[in-house]
Image (cartoon, coloured by chain):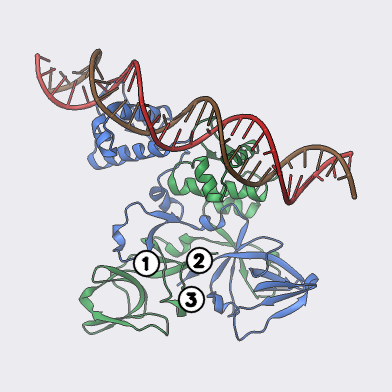
Chain colours: A green, B blue, C brown, D red
Amino acid sequence: MAITKRQRQVYDFIHSFVQRNGYSPSFEEIGDGLGLSSLATVHKHVSNLEKKGLLRRDYNRSRSIDVLPMRGLLKRQTEKAAAEGRLPLLGRIAAGQPIEAVEQPETISLGDITRSKDVFVLQVKGESMRDEHIVDGDYVLVEKVQNAPDGEIVVALVDGTDATLKRIYRDGAKVRLQPSNAEMAPIIVPAKSVQVQGRVIGVLRKY
Amino acid sequence: MAITKRQRQVYDFIHSFVQRNGYSPSFEEIGDGLGLSSLATVHKHVSNLEKKGLLRRDYNRSRSIDVLPMRGLLKRQTEKAAAEGRLPLLGRIAAGQPIEAVEQPETISLGDITRSKDVFVLQVKGESMRDEHIVDGDYVLVEKVQNAPDGEIVVALVDGTDATLKRIYRDGAKVRLQPSNAEMAPIIVPAKSVQVQGRVIGVLRKY
DNA sequence: AAATTTTAGCGAATAAACAGCGAATGTCAA
DNA sequence: TTGACATTCGCTGTTTATTCGCTAAAATTT
């Protein structure tokens, strides 16, 4: 009763679709998401997953898929951790120890970064923070604040229109927005035309 | 007992109407809110939602809809967000829009990266992946796998003792572990003394 | 190694459920 | 008794699911 690679992909897609949208995908949407052109294929996958007890749905009813949790199919570590977005932190790499050896794993989650702060996420476009190792496609976690100390990486709105990610430095009535990219020039504008939207407190990258 | 797209919209509309006004909408108001000109349509939607246990109302009574919480079903992303470490994804930076403006934010969480995979986290020590923008102190999310395709970033155990983070390339009986740092030399060892612990699927950084 | 089963995939035809309309009819409370 | 609402009927599209027949690859069994 194991699950195949492809079946897992289907399961994952449906799961994340429901997360995002709050309703289940149509077979066509599943097909699109997985690069399948035939609904028959999707149908078969869904049926198989149903047979394995990972999904439930009503016959002939659109968007009626319920995603059931993977009982037993997952390894222990992720089971309870994944339920709340926590991941086991197994130690430092290059520490010269086999990974398994770590005793009592700590865990880590986004909550550790956000705490009780008011946080939102933006996806980064462009290379203006390259030297900070924040690159195109990364997600930055931003704490909503109106002011930030000199030198912080902030999301700044210039003239109410352009949101940019820069280090901020104040200099009298002027503000310097400094890209962390040696090839790019700083933006220097009057303090009153800059509005700080938040400060960067974390970075998340998916491969 | 899943819900369709349109039903979700109806449910959401009623929910937010009650939030705003403190009393439930008439069928006509629901219709207006959703661009429906026929009350019959509204009636059908409300009946269906009632059947699914998401609403309750008294027969033939005006404005008598009660919105029931979605037990077991999906809450709206934004509500659910806070509860479990999901963060609102407000868009791409440098997109030229004030941040507040976004209507229906998507959300993001570690779960989006991990899905149903078996994942652990390691903290990175050293600068061997600097050119990949993975630096000292970063946390890497690692999917536990035994093999990874050429060119992937993996956690590799050499001779059962040293865990390192490198790109992997196979070359016959040899394996080349390539640091992403121009100043560092690759490690070339016999394939049998290398054990892949996992592949990197994400990066997390705290400031 | 060969045979078999399971998985994965395609396109097309068919059928069911979903979503919608307008109009006539009924009910409730003030 | 009069507004304001709710109910129900018949009818029309659109969306979505089901199924059939067919390949091909991968995994399992003999």
Q: Which residue is drawn at 59% across and 79% down?
A: B126
> Do tag 3 and tag 2 residues touch (Cβ < 8 Å)?
no
The amino acid on which the numbered mark 1 sits, given as a three-letter code, is Ile
Which is nearer the eye, B69 or A101? Answer: B69
Q: In which quarter of the image is residue B49?
A: top left
Chain letter of disc 3?
A
> Do tag 3 and tag 1 residues touch (Cβ < 8 Å)?
no
Q: State the CA–CA distance, disc 3 to disc 2.
A: 11 Å
Badge 2 density bin: few <14, some 14–19, many ≥20, Cα 10 Å? many
Residue at which label 2 appears: A205
- Whether C5 is drawn above or below B47: the answer is below
Q: Quadrant of residue B178?
A: bottom right
Q: Is residue A104 left or right of residue B107?
A: right
Q: Quadrant of the C terminus of chain B?
A: bottom left
Say what secondary structure mark 1 lies in: loop
Residue at which label 3 appears: A133
Residue at which label 1 appears: B93
Labels 3 and 1 share a subunit: no
Q: Which residue is drawn at 37% across and 67% down?
A: B93
Chain letter of disc 2?
A
Which is nearer the eye, A76 or D28? Answer: D28
